[in-house]
Amino acid sequence: MQPFYSLVNFSNGKVTDYHNKAIRKYKDMENFFKMYLTKDIKANLKEKTIYESYEIRLPKKNGNLSWCTTIIYPGDIAGEYFMTKGHFHKNDISAELYLCIQGEGYIIMQNHEGKFIDCKIVPGKAISVPPEWGHRVINSDKNNKLIFVAVYASDAGHDYAFIEEKGFKKLLISENGKPKFIDNPNYQK
Ligand code: M6P
Ligand code: ZN
């Protein structure tokens, strides 16, 4: 393989020459939001775009790195801010680097023993997610996009099962216009 480059647009998060674009709507990640909602309200939210991402994806071969930009739109679902699904890596020994380039929010991380850590993110802040920690990014600014770059082993893979079923220990909700962590009522361990 030859070296190659892409350009990241720091204003809108788009990347040139990407291999894969993903758009996640509410209907793609309903179960990841844990605040109670009636069926009718859920039905009305189905087409809402929560985030999109542009990935430079290299073959899943040991030693390759893939990376992507993600743009999380502003908003909330029953108070829970828009966020990524959150995942562990299938290949659990894989770490990940996150670099925030626009907006503000939080990265939350949780390991298999249930230890939970949150870290505020602002442009320029780079966060190292160690192996064996589940991770999610949350946009806590209801008026602006949150844009970040993530770099990970191409064979890391995504394991969503635990997060989809139980979630993280804490949820970040908007209370009186301010972000606040509360216990996730769905989480028992
Ligand atoms: C980051 C990376 C990607 C991930 C994306 C969205 O850019 O970690 O691998 O897919 O965030 O996160 P999720 O898949 O958890 O919704
Ligand atoms: Zn990851």
Image (cartoon, grey):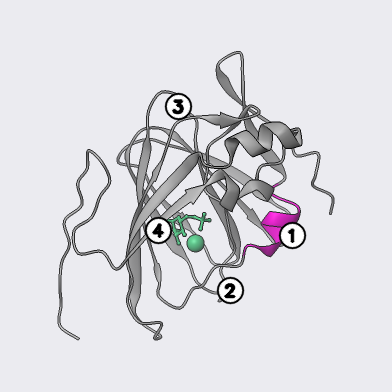
Q: Which residue is mark 1?
A: 113
**Residue 88 vertical position relative to residue 52 in the rendered view, above or below:** below
Residue contact between numbered discs 3 and 2, judged by CB atoms under 8 Å: no
Q: Is residue 71 left or right of residue 182?
A: left
Count the marks. 4
**Residue 120 vertical position relative to residue 27 in the rendered view, above or below:** above
Q: Is residue 67 left or right of residue 39?
A: left
Numbered circle sitting on residue 90: 2
How far, Cα to Cα, is label 1 from label 2?
17 Å
Q: Is residue 7 magenta?
A: no
User: What secondary structure is marked by label 2?
Assistant: loop
How far, Cα to Cα, is label 3 from label 2?
30 Å
The amino acid pointed to by label 2 is: Lys
Judge depth for marks 1 and 2 and give the one in front: 2
Judge depth for marks 3 and 4 and give the one in front: 3
Residue contact between numbered discs 4 and 1, judged by CB atoms under 8 Å: no
**Residue beneath the point at 61% across and 13% down:** 176
Residue contact between numbered discs 3 and 4, judged by CB atoms under 8 Å: no
Numbered circle sitting on residue 97: 4
Q: Which residue is mark 3?
A: 141
The amino acid pointed to by label 3 is: Asp
User: What secondary structure is marked by label 4?
Assistant: strand
The residue nearer to you, when weighing 156 against 45, is 45
Residue stretch rendered in magenta on the structure? 160-168
The amino acid pointed to by label 1 is: Glu
Q: State which tag comes first along the sequence, 4 or 1.
A: 4
